[in-house]
Image (cartoon, helix red, strand yellow):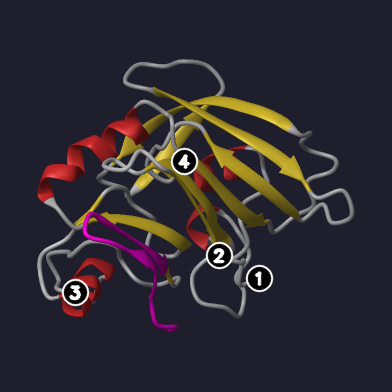
């Protein structure tokens, strides 16, 4: 597994590049996690503002002050944050999808560690929305802008459209020879909670 990297750090926050296969937060089993790694680097407690699935690589934002956690989280809740992902699918998308907005409804199944996706609203469901732009010369690749940040959202919506993400065998994707799955959080934009400066970060996709 590759090492995490700190891309930016000041007194308020830090932006990191997480490798696939590393959890963001501690779990009951005591597996290594990104939060623990950051705290070892800076020497004090930190708080993740959002999450990435363990098999997903890419950008993660941490607050270095407890008082700044809520203001940063509010930006995600109010959808003023831009999050873009690179996706590589197991099957071509050209015959199945078109560029544009995908809207579905999802029901989280914590006992099964999955998200069930439906075309119409069902009891206990939450709205799922993302924008998809398929690469014109490679219908296995797409850029996804997340509009609602739900558990396993991108993975489950792609699987629902019969184009599961490469490596994501849990949702029906084909296995591959790399760590994790072919889903990478490559772009993050938000407002600094203190300076109000527009912050923008990107990290190239590993696939």
For the point 71% across and 50% down, the residue is 142
- Choose mark 4 or mark 1, whichever is in front: 1
Frontmost of labels 2 and 1 is 2
Real-space CA distance between mark 2 and mark 4, rounded to the nearest whole angstrom: 21 Å
- Earlier sequence position, callout 1 versus callout 3: 3
**In terms of secondary structure, where does tag 3 sit?**
helix
Residue 31 visible to an observer of this rendering? no
Residue closest to the eye, 23 or 104: 23
Name the N-terminal-most of marks 4 and 1: 4
Give the residue at mark 4.
153
- Determine contact: label 1, label 3, CB under 8 Å: no
Left or right of 82 on screen, residue 204: right
Percent across and percent down for residue 196 are: 35, 38
Mark 3 or mark 2, earlier in chain: 3
Q: CA distance from mark 4 to mark 3?
A: 32 Å
| Mark 4, other Cα within 10 Å: few <14 / some 14–19 / many ≥20 | many
Q: Quadrant of residue 13?
A: bottom left
In the picture, the disc for residue 203 is 2
Point out which mark residue 207 bears: 1
Tag of residue 42: 3
Asked if residue 96 lies left or right of residue 64, the reply is right
The residue drawn where x is 27% and y is 48% is 49
In whole angstroms, how far apart are the C-alphas of marks 2 and 1? Answer: 12 Å
Among numbered discs 4 and 3, the one appearing first in the sequence: 3
The range drawn in magenta is 1-17
Which element carries disc 2, helix, strand or loop?
loop
Q: Is residue 10 magenta?
A: yes
Which label sits on residue 194? none
Image quadrant for the C terminus? Answer: bottom right
Q: Residue at x 12, y 76 (%)?
A: 43
**Is residue 28 among what the camera can see?**
yes
Q: How far, Cα to Cα, is label 1 from label 3?
A: 30 Å
């Amino acid at each position: 597994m590759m090492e995490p990297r700190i891309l930016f750090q000041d007194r308020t926050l830090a932006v990191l590049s997480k490798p696939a296969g590393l959890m963001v937060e501690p779990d009951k089993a005591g597996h290594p996690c990104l939060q623990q790694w950051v705290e070892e680097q800076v020497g004090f407690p930190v708080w993740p503002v959002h999450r990435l699935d363990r098999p997903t690589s890419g950008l993660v934002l941490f607050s270095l002050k407890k008082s700044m956690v809520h203001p940063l989280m509010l930006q995600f809740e109010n959808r003023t944050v831009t999050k873009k992902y690179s996706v590589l699918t197991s099957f071509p998308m050209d015959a199945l999808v078109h560029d544009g907005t995908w809207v579905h409804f999802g029901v989280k199944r914590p006992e099964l560690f999955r998200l069930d996706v439906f075309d119409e609203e069902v009891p206990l469901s939450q709205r799922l929305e993302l924008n998809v732009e398929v690469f014109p010369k490679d219908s296995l690749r797409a850029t996804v802008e997340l509009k609602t940040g739900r558990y396993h959202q991108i993975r489950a919506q792609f699987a629902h459209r019969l184009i599961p993400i490469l490596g994501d065998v849990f949702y029906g994707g084909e296995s591959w020879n790399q760590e994790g799955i072919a889903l990478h959080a490559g772009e993050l934009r938000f407002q600094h909670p203190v300076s109000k400066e527009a912050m923008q970060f990107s990290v190239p996709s590993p696939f």
